[in-house]
Amino acid sequence: MPSTIVHAGFALLLAAGLLKGAFDRRALAVLLVIVVIPEADTIAGLWLDGAHRALLHNLTIPIVGGLLLYWDTSYRERSWLRDRWGWWGVRVAWVGLFVHVFAHVLLDYAHLEGINAFYPIVDRFVRLEGELALSTTEGIVQTFVDVDLDVGVASEDGTDGIAADVGVTGTTADTHVDNPVEPSTAVEDDADGPVERLFPVAESGWQLYLVLSGLFVLVARRFQDRRERDDR
Amino acid sequence: MAPTLVNVAAGVLIGLALLGAAVDRRSLLVVALAAAVPDLDAVLSLAIQGATNAVFHTLLLPGVAFVVLYWDTRCRERSWLATRYGWYGVRVAWVALGSYVVAGIGLDLFRPEGVNLLYPLHDRFYAVVGRLLLSTQDGLILTFVERGETPLWLTSPGTTADHHVATWVNPTPGTGLETGVERRLTLVESGWQLVVVAAAIGATAARFRLERTDEDEQDPGVKTETDGEH
């Protein structure tokens, strides 16, 4: 996984733009919890094969959560969330959902073996990788999704029509995503000796960038608030 | 040079985060453009050797802008910007400057091609690349910082004389417009960049929706932020 710190940095950048009046210490604390909780499936991985990046890293939870939230806040006559925490609670809940999807699930979707997108309904790890470019010799180059346009032609495995390779990497049975709780080396080697556990903060320049841009926004916001208080 | 689309996406996210009550279509466009402007030095590289990631990616330019903006908005008795455009103009100017530095220059600094940070005073490209992690065997592993012969302790891919950053404008080293070479305008290079672009689009849509609905509903955030400066 890109480290939790990278997720938190990107989440901060997104949340600062969406919380508006609800941007306060309490809201940021709630969002931090939302960012950290999915990593708990690394611990579940000790008992359940392939649980990491499947159990809590999927799109099923945010879809169900989003429907519930919509039903509660827009459809019901009296919203439980609004009664309990008012306007603030509704805003933080929606931003939390947004941050969970973009800063956590989708960022992991583009990293290592990806995520188990629709676990437990469909057990398939998928990974987002590719590029999008315009070339003077090749035209539009798009390698995120490989679409095989053999319409009407039966391919070897019996499926006909359009076959699309969306970056499937495996199922919970054969996929293990490296993490500090269960390092890949320990899973594969069954070694008795001490296992090296790596806790990444930032594995590359862009990950450090996301962390720093989140911090930049936090510092700039405090600066703006102070100035506004001084001016009054 | 990172794909300009990704620079713009990062700029939009910074704009949404910092513009506050000044968020509207016009201010967001200004902030997004500020993130794209540094990449225009690729055009200058057709005439100036090694200008890509150097001429407009230098910190001197925003440094001068910072001094001018600070002097105008804080030191002068009557700020020209505030008189002309009010609180809105001052806020947009500061956020656009931040977007230029963080989304325009910053994003390119954290890539192997690097950025010529102090061009033309000190002609050297610098890049913040490496990793930072904690290992139970080796302790702290930090390779972002590198003590070398360069004054800044960062990886350096070279100077304008020997380091060329390939772009679709100028794909080959040296100056001059060449014909018959493949030009490739990269929009998105990898998965994480696509996620950043998607997040910027999603956040913009969500924020404009909020701006519309908040006019009807009571949102304390709208009222507390409308006055003040910076």
Image (cartoon, coloured by chain):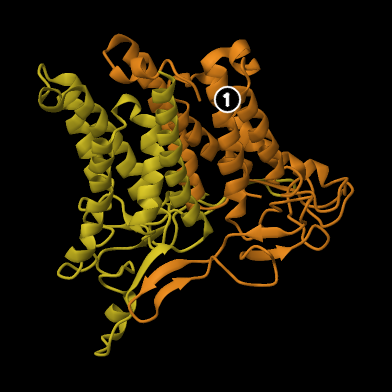
Q: Residue at x 50, y 62 (%)?
A: A204
Q: Residue at x 25, y 68 (%)?
A: A173
Q: Chain of mark 1?
A: B
Q: Residue at x 36, y 61 (%)?
A: A1
- Can see residue A186? yes
Of residue A29 and residue A228, the one placed in the foreground of this image is: A228
Q: Colour of chain B?
A: orange
Instruction: Give coordinates of residue B187: x percent, y percent.
Output: 60, 44
Q: Quadrant location of residue A72?
A: top left
Chain displayed in yellow? A
Which residue position holds label 1? Answer: B74
Relative to B130, does residue B120 appear above or below in the rendering?
Answer: above
Left or right, B178 with reference to B35:
right
Label 1 neighbour load within 10 Å: few <14, some 14-19, many 20+: few
**Hey, which residue is sitting farthest top in the picture?**
B216
Of residue A153 and residue B41, the one placed in the foreground of this image is: B41
Left or right, B158 with reference to A12:
right
Q: Quadrant location of residue A67?
A: top left
